[in-house]
Amino acid sequence: MQAALECSKIEVIRLQGNINAANVLECERDLTTALTQNDLSILAVDLAAVESLDSAGLMAFVSALKLAQNLGRSLKLCSVSPAIRIIFELTQLDGVFEFEDNAELLTAN
């Protein structure tokens, strides 16, 4: 008998600075490109260096989550600061997204 092991490919994207209307298209492009890789299972978005997030940035994450779900992939937000986390809580999206303390823990396995 053979045992099949499924190996998940995890990619980490590290965003930094402000995610807002001025640069949201670049952010969306990066997320979409990463999610559409053929062998990707999990996209971890490291937000440790993100200073601010506006509604356009928030919508970019919602769009990326929808794309991930449509492709049967997982999107995880990692290292989210309290200032950014409150935005997800106020919009009640904290129950929709998956949060991880540290992206490095995902790739350690």
Image (spheres, rainbow, N blue to C red):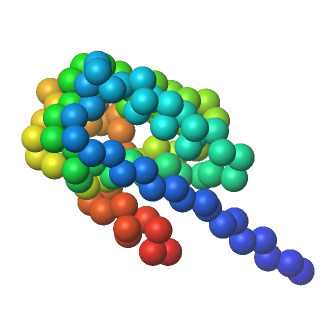
Residue 58 in view (yes/no): no
Which residue appears at 66% of the width and 66% of the height? Answer: 7
Apparent side of residue 87 relative to residue 44 in the rendered image (left or right): left
Which residue appears at 47% of the width and 68% of the height? Answer: 107
Residue 101 in view (yes/no): yes
Task: Give above or below for 27 relative to 104.
Answer: above
Question: Residue placed farthest to the left in the image?
Answer: 83
Q: Estimate the x, y position of residue 64 in percent, counting from the top left.
A: 47, 31
Q: Estimate the x, y position of residue 69 in percent, counting from the top left.
A: 55, 34
- In the image shown, does 106 or 34 lie closer to the viewer? 34
Q: Estimate the x, y position of residue 17 in percent, counting from the top left.
A: 22, 41
Which residue appears at 54% of the width and 34% of the height? Answer: 32
Residue 36, by quadrant, is top right
Q: Estimate the x, y position of residue 58 in percent, counting from the top left.
A: 30, 26
Which residue appears at 10% of the width and 41% of the height? Answer: 83
Apparent side of residue 85 relative to residue 1 in the rendered image (left or right): left
- In the image shown, does 56 or 7 lie closer to the viewer? 56
Residue 84, by quadrant, is top left
